[in-house]
Amino acid sequence: MTKALKGKMAMITGASSGIGWATAEVLGTQGASLILCGRRKDRLRELQSKLDTPTHLLVFDVGDKSAVFEKINSLPKAFSSIDILINNAGNAHGLKPVHKADIEDWDAMIDSNVKGLMYVTKAILPSMVSRKTGHIINLGSIAGKEVYPHGSVYCSSKYAIDAFTQGLRLDLNSLNIKVSAINPGLVNTEFSDVRFKGDKDKATQVYKGLTPLIAKDVADVILYMVQAPEHVNLADVLLLPKAQANTYVAHRKP
């Protein structure tokens, strides 16, 4: 059986866990060659060992501008023509009102969620533009559609991604490059562990009483997006668990 993505090259940031890891597994099963990016080399190697498809590892922090361009520009020729970019790397730190929040947390979110996504996009675009082909998928969030209490800076970072994605789609419209966004709601990954700095009790409470999305749910939609007919672009997808109505209303069982 012919695999749908055979011959395609996909680059995934934040591939060492969660949605990035699941996306690598799903795209790999369909034959895509993969460039796996992340900060944790041991985790990337673990993922690589599980995949039956050509892979190349890039270890860097997306918020480090010099590292982004150095690593991407160093790709071997066999992995240099990227067809699909999944901008997944990002984080959330803290959940406090503005007057009590930690500025270092703000910097971490803006550097990764906004600047990092822009740096990676800028680094891969010359090849896509010269070939007039490609598909960029940005991982946004429902938090980029609606603000919730104590999430002002995280929400701001996701609103910025939403605006950047729309602008990118306009800029690349005449160049045959698709630009899409997927905006998940509650997904059970390392997200809450990181937000609450390893406090497992607080992280568990986020999903208590409901069935959240899992990483593979998001990865399966990404697969659908990249397999859509050439004339179809799922430009802006909001993906929620059934129990979630918006950023702060969710039906929870006792």
Image (spheres, helix red, strand yellow):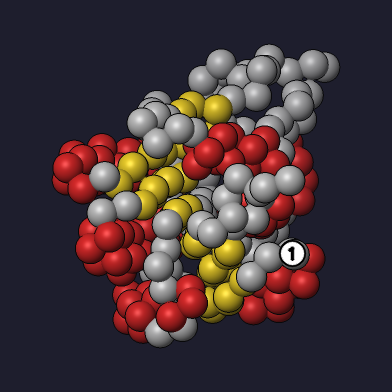
Q: Mark 1 points at which residue?
A: 51
Q: Position of residue 211 (x, y in %)?
A: 76, 26
- Relative to residue 164, is residue 52 depicted above or below? below
Residue at the farthest right position: 254
133 left or right of 97 in image: left
- State the count of labels: 1
Identify which residue is drawn at 61% across, 20% down. Answer: 244
The picture quadrant where one finds residue 121 is bottom left
Name the secondary structure under disc 1: loop
Which quadrant of the rendered structure holds the C terminus? top right
Residue 161 visible in the shown view: yes
At x 23% / y 59%, what residue is drawn? 129
Measuring from the top left, give residue 73's x and y in whole percent.
35, 80
Indicate the position of residue 152 as horizontal and vertical percent values: 38, 40
* As drawn, 47 above or below 76: above
**Is 200 positioned to the left or the right of 113 in the image?**
right
